[in-house]
Every structure is written in C-alpha cells, then in structure tokens.
Amino acid sequence: MDLYYLIVFFVFGLIFGSFYNVVGYRLPNNMSLINPPSHCPKCDHRLAPLELIPVFSYLFQGGKCKNCKSKIAIFYPIFELFTGIVFALIYKIFGISIDTFIALVFSSMLLIIMISDILYMIIPDELLLFCGIVIFILKLVSGGINIILPTLLDMIIPFITLLIIKLLGDKAFKRESMGGGDIKLMIIFGMVLGWEVSIFTIVLASFIALPITIIINVINKNNDHELPFGPYLSIAALICLLTKVDIMTILHFLGF
C-alpha cells in the first residue's frame, strides 16, 4: 500500500509539475491560466492530449514539437520529474495528514516561484495570497484557534528580519538590493517552518546563492548583473521542509 501511494503522489506531481510550468510563465504576464490552451510557442500548434503527457510526451517526440519540429527545452520534463519526486517525498515524510496538504501547497508555491522569479524576477502577489490563505486555513483546521497568536509571531519575525536586511543592503549598495516579493515570502515561510527555521533559510539560501552568483557573473563578465533571490530561498525552504529540520538540530549542528 505504501508503494501504491508513493506512485500516486509521484504521478500527481508529474501532472501538477506540468501545470506549474504554465502558471510560472503566465501568472507574471497577467495571462489566463486556461486560455489560450497549451501550444507550441514557435508555431502556435495547439497540443493534443497525447502531447501533454508529462515527461513521456517529451521522450516520445524526441524533444521536438510534433508540428514544426522545433526543440522543446529539456527544462520542462526535468521540472515535471522534480515535482513528482518532491510530491512522493512529501508523502513518505508526512504520510496522509493535514501536514501533508500544507507541505504540498507550500512546495507547490516554491516550485512556481522558482520559475517566475528566474524568468521574470517576479514573485506574484496572487500566488502568495492564495497559498498563504489556504495554508492558514489548513493550520486552523489542524491546531484550532489557539495557534493564531504563535503563528502570527512566526509570520512577523522573519518578515521583519529580511526587511531589515534589505534596508541595510539598499543603504550599502545605494540601490534596491532585494525585491519586495522575497520579503513577503518570509511571511509564509514563518507560517509553515516557524520563525527560527525561516531565518535559517535566509542564511542557507545565501550560502547556496554565493557560488552560483560568482559563476554566473564570471560567465557574463558583469558584476552588476541582477539575480533573483527567490529561487535560492525556495530551495532552502524545500530542504528544511523535507528534512523536517528544527532549531535544536540547527543549534546542535552549529556546535551549541
């Protein structure tokens, strides 16, 4: 039975991963998520059902559009596969519970942010608002009205922390050092991970971003090239979510 649910979650992850590709592209452009239907961006060929099967359609078509034969970016099947793995891991870690649904909504938001922030350097407010409301309702169902005050504190502290970092960065670099979406994102991080782990994700994201930023700037030969921080925060949050790390584990790792 455990294997059955793992497969089900993995398959649903593949399907949702395909949809998140669309959301991450269309939402920042204020486009409908339904119309126009999925199509080839090169020739506008409307994709048939058999061309919409996650991962497998890419393999069967040899990574090319069935109509115009233009290459399809390999990012799409990789992202779908990654989403499937994340969904399967969430089931393995959380089982079937309210926490599972919170983790699914949270990870889905992070995955969409990775796409939208990389492509357009935008973290859509609509996405944060929708996922934040759903997660808060799920937490109320799970913990009752008593969780409201501690949850609000968990939301406020990381938000203020990253806001202070942004203001200091703006002053140091004499320009905007971080987008407002990154700061608002911390509200939902706090809601799901708690304020202590949320602050840790800022540190972890910085360590992940540093070598990648250096490599990209060397390749581009442009130290002024702006890079989004949202994807690094999302990766750090996914790591913390899937490892179920807590503040005691972090302090022990740091030697305290």
Image (cartoon, rainbow, N blue to C red):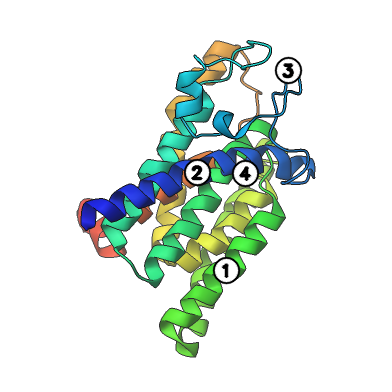
Relative placement, left or right, of 30 versus 213 is right
Element under disc 3: loop
Element under disc 4: helix
Element under disc 1: helix
Give the image quarter of residue 169.
top right
What is the spatial separation of the Cα atoms under label 2 and label 4, in whole angstroms?
Answer: 40 Å
Q: Nearer the viewer, residue 193 or 102?
A: 102
Mark 4 — residue?
169
Mark 1 — residue?
134
Mark 2 — residue?
15
Q: Give percent across and percent down for residue 56.
A: 45, 28
Residue 53 is marked as none
- Count neighbours of disc 4 (C-alpha within 10 A) and say few if under 14, some if 14 to 19, many if 20 or more: some
Q: Amino acid type of disc 4?
A: Gly
Q: Give percent across and percent down for residue 178.
A: 64, 43
Mark 3 — residue?
42
Q: Earlier in the sequence, mark 1 or mark 2?
A: 2
Q: Give percent across and percent down for residue 185.
A: 58, 56
Is residue 91 in sight in this rendering? yes
